[in-house]
Every structure is written in C-alpha cells, then in structure tokens.
Image (tube, grey):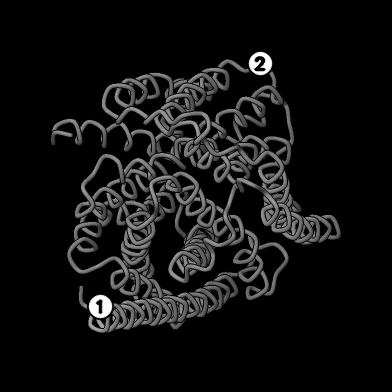
Amino acid sequence: MAAPSVRWALAGLSLSMLLSSLGTSIANVALPTLAQAFTASFQEVQWIVLAYLLAITTLIVSVGRLGDIIGRRRLLLAGISLFTVASVLCGIAPTLWLLVAARAAQGLGAAVMMALTMAFVGETVPKAKTGRAMGLLGTMSAIGTALGPSLGGVLIAGLGWRAIFLVNAPLGVLTFLLAHRYLPVDQRKPKADRARFDNVGTLLLALTLAAYALAMTTGHGSFGPFNLALLLAAAFGVGLFVRAEARAVSPLIRLAMFRDPALSASLAMSMLVSTVMMATLVVGPFYLSRTLGLDEALVGLVLSVGPLVAALTGVPAGRVADRFGAQRMTVVGLIGIATGSLILSMRSGTPGISGYIAPIVVITAGYAVFQTANNTAVMAGVHPDRRGVTSGMLNLSRNLGLITGTSVMGAVFAFASATTDVTTARSGAVATGMRVTFAVAAILILVALAIAVGSRALSRRASGETTVDAELQGEEDIRLIGSAPRQ
C-alpha cells in the first residue's frame, strides 16, 4: 500500500477510535440536564452512561472474534454505521428508556470500532512502525476522553443536550467513507475453511462480564448483598465459560493463548494500570475542590491536564517503543506511573495546584508510554487470524480495570477519608484519603512491574530452551548424515 493510502487509512482508524472514546465521556456532563429533561432520578439517568459501558464491556471480545471470522473491514463498516445511526436515535429519543436503548446500540457499534481499529494496524502499517501507529490511536483515545466533558458542556449550553449525540452523525459518515475507501479488502475464504462462531461461549462471556460490571458499578458507592450476589454469579460464569471453551470446536477464546506468558502478563498489567488510572478521576475532583478549594471551572481545567499529557505523549511513545523495544518501554512506563503515585502518597500538608499537577503529569506520561508499548508488544506478534479477538481482549482488560478502579479505588478513598460521604468530608480528611489511595496505587503498579519482569524472564527461558532444542536437533541431523552409509 502506498504511503498516502496508509495515512488516509490511519486517519479513518483514528476517527473511529476518537468517536468511540468520545461516546464514553461526553454523556456524563449531561446527566443533570437529562434528569430535568425527562423528570427522572439521578439513578435512572445513570443508565445512559451504564448502557454504553456495559455494551462495550460485554461484547468487545466477541465482536473482535466475529471480525476474524467474517472479515474485519466488513464488520468495522457495519459497526461505524450502527454507531452513527444510533447516535441520531439518541439525539431524537422522546423518552429516557428509548435513549438508554439507543445508547446500548451505540455501545455495540463502539465495541466493534474499538476492537477492530487496533487489529487493522497489522494490515495497514509496516511492522517497524507498529508502535507509532499504536501511539497515534492511544493519542486519539485520550483526546476523545478529554474532549468529551468540555465539548459536551459547550454543546449543551449552546444547542441543548440532543446536540451531544447528533454531533457524531457527520463525523461518523466521514469515518465510514475513509474506512470504505482506504482499508484493505477482506480476503475471502472458502466456507469450508471458515471457523464457526462460538454462540455458547459468547453468551456465557457476555452474561459473566455484565454481572461483574453491574457488581462494580451499582449500589452508589456501597457494596451490599445484591453486589455480592452479582460477583458470585460472575465467578460461577467464569467456571462455566472455561468449561464451554475447553469443549468447543471453534472457541471464542483459545485457552491455550493464556499459556503465553507475554500475553497473560500484558492483559494482567493492563487491568492493574487501568485500575490505578481510575484513581486520578475518582480522587482528583474531591481533592481539588474540598482540599485546594478550587471552583468547578478550575477543577475541570486541572483534570484536563492528564488526558492532554497522554495525548501529547502517545505518538512520541510509539516512536520510542519502535526504537528501543516494546517490552523495555513497558517497564519504563510502569516506573513512571509508580514514581508519580509514590510522590502523591508522600505529600505532607497541602502542596497546592502545582504540587498536584506535577506528579499527575508523570503518571499520565508513564501511562501513555505503557499503553502504547504494551499494545505494540501484543499486537505485533499475534497471528493475523487472531488479531480481532486479541485486540478485543486488550480493550476488555482496560475496561475491566476502569470499572474495577471506580469501585475499588473509590472505596479505598472513602475508607481512608474516614467518612461515608466524601462530598462533605473535611479538607484534611480528603488529603489523607488522597495519600492513602495513591499509596495503594503505587503497590498495584509494583505488582505490575513484578509481572513485567517475571514474564520477560519466562519468555527468555522459553526462547532459550527453543534455541537449545533447535541446536541439539541440528547436531543430531549432522550426526545422522555423517553416519549414513555412502552410496
């Protein structure tokens, strides 16, 4: 593929990542307005956010695998179309529950876009530039997440809440046209060679993930009997899923994949890091408003620093990963996150805005390096027939980390602040809660570092054993040739 075509293909993939990330964050700022518009409680309008998140979380692996089977280009175009149409339906929804249903459909389209966008990098970009392409997609994801609240606020103030959904329509059409024109055409396989779609595994995984996501997000900050029942159901679902996959002729996820120490480590690290990154969003607003006394505008401005740093760091991080190796830069990124978290955990007194922003910059820059390098390490070596499902698993590990972080880090913060209602806690208690939360975050990143180092050692041992076996086999072949009777 010629260089200009590669650039336009990457433009289409970047827009796909931007829109799906924008959909995650743009609706949050509209919840008070939507509660008034539909005369609904805050708990009811939360389903506008939750429906989108649940659709992505429960289906992202399945749609990635479906793309591997029927063709990634075909499915991505369908996903972009669904996302665009669902966005319009969100914008014209006359009732709250029709809006929630449209958001679930929009989330399904976003799941396709997220899962297949990374999978396409291997088909559109030379292997030596994989890191740069992954960095670009990470940048677009960060921009979409950061842009959501501010763009949503401007659109609601100027045009009303419906505009936050309708704005996706022209961008969706442009994304579709770029993907249709510049992405490589799917290779048609004979029907006999096509793998079958794992319907049972897909249903079990979706129900299991839905139970886990609901256990972590419902209850409004408290973990009651209903949450525990959902968590037990999710654990039972994991057992059923593993059993079903072991028996399936064409499983959704090949359990043998997890024998690869590099892949298993990457997924575990991604979930841990995403759990920690959620702490900045859970703790930040309360610390900035309650302890530092900032108004809403300044809080929003300070919170946008993190995503902005991640956006600016993404592409350079990809170049560095290509040059120095993805595994090495994964460790560097983790060290950056751990360093920033330790600085915040050891702050005494009230360091002021700059004392909070500086460590956050270190954390988010480290996150951008980690995310780009970790995704590159996984996707660069995956078999073409498994790119979709592997990309889906990477995105799933990130989403599960964000969901877990919302619940777990929020609970740690509330416990450390010694209050049941953080919104009314004293400034000193909130500062203590912030330090304890980031101390826990640093411990989690140290665990991720141990996993990274351990997986590298296992990979080296495995490659060393393979090399020794090959050398022994070569020596045996030479010996047999030398001892063979001459004709």
Task: Please tell me which residue is depicted at 86% across the width and 60% down the height of the picture.
Answer: 225
Q: Nearer the viewer, residue 39 or 109?
A: 109
Q: Which residue lies furthest to the front in this view?
A: 487
Quadrant holding the N terminus: top left
Quadrant hosting residue 119: top left
Sequence-wise, the earlier of marks 1 and 2 is 2
> How far is mark 1 from mark 2, CA to CA?
81 Å
Task: Please tell me which residue is depicted at 46% across the width and 29% down the height of the picture.
Answer: 190
Task: Please tell me which residue is depicted at 68% across the width and 46% down the height of the picture.
Answer: 201
Task: Please tell me which residue is depicted at 43% across the width and 80% down the height of the picture.
Answer: 458
SS for callout 1: helix
From where the camera sits, is residue 174 visible? yes
Q: Residue 362 location, x and y as percent?
A: 32, 69
Q: Which of 343 and 111 is in front in this view?
A: 111
Above/below status of 209 relative to 430:
above
Q: Is 176 displayed left or right of 94 in the figure?
A: left
From where the camera sits, is residue 275 visible? no
Q: Is 96 displayed left or right of 448 in the figure?
A: right
Callout 2 amino acid: Pro
Q: Residue 67 location, x and y as percent?
A: 48, 36
SS for callout 2: loop
Quadrant holding the C terminus: bottom left
Q: Name the residue under label 1.
A: 481
Q: Which of 431 and 117 is in front in this view?
A: 117
- Mark 2 closeness class: few <14, some 14–19, many ≥20 residues within 10 Å: few
Quadrant hosting residue 313: bottom left
Q: Name the residue under label 2.
A: 94
The tally of labels here is 2
Q: Nearer the viewer, residue 476 or 238?
A: 476
